[in-house]
Image (cartoon, helix red, strand yellow):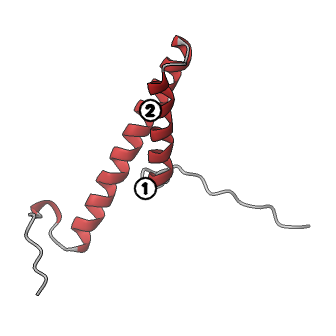
């Protein structure tokens, strides 16, 4: 018997949607809404999706920030510093 393809579930919080794809979709929604050609129902639907995408993007950025802090070994005590090109 041939093996069945196993689909990976996005069940944990680390399996976030692609940030760039979410941001692009959000930009497209804003453009559609700014045109003012949508019905009220369409506008509400797009607005709701926009809120979801905003939250996804914020979570992805927060996750990336935490990874950076972990990589530089400062964790919660991380402080911003100047970048010297020396």
x, y (%) of residue 49?
A: 49, 30
What secondary structure is found at the residue carrying circle 1?
A: loop
Q: Residues within 10 Å of mark 1 (few under 14, many from 20)?
A: few
10 relative to 2, above or below = above
What is the quadrant of the N terminus in the image? bottom right
| Residue at image point 18% right, 73% down | 73
Q: Which residue is mark 2?
A: 30
What secondary structure is found at the residue carrying circle 2?
A: helix
Count of labels shown?
A: 2
Residue at the farthest top position: 40
x, y (%) of residue 71?
A: 26, 73
Q: Which residue is mark 1?
A: 14
What is the quadrant of the C terminus in the image? bottom left
In the image: residue 60, left or right of residue 76: right
| Residue at image point 46% right, 39% down | 26
35 relative to 3, above or below = above
In the image: residue 56, left or right of residue 82: right
| Residue at image point 43% right, 55% down | 14
64 relative to 34, above or below = below
Foreground mark, 2 or 1?
2
Residue 55 sits in which quadrant? top left
């Amino acid at each position: 018997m041939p093996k069945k393809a196993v689909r990976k579930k996005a069940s944990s919080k680390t399996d976030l949607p692609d940030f760039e794809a979410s941001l692009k979709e959000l930009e497209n929604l804003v453009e559609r809404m700014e045109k003012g050609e949508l019905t009220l129902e369409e506008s509400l639907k797009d607005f709701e999706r926009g809120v979801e995408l905003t939250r996804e993007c914020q979570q992805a950025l927060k996750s990336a920030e935490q990874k950076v802090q972990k990589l530089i070994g400062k964790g919660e005590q991380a402080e911003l510093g100047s970048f010297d090109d020396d």
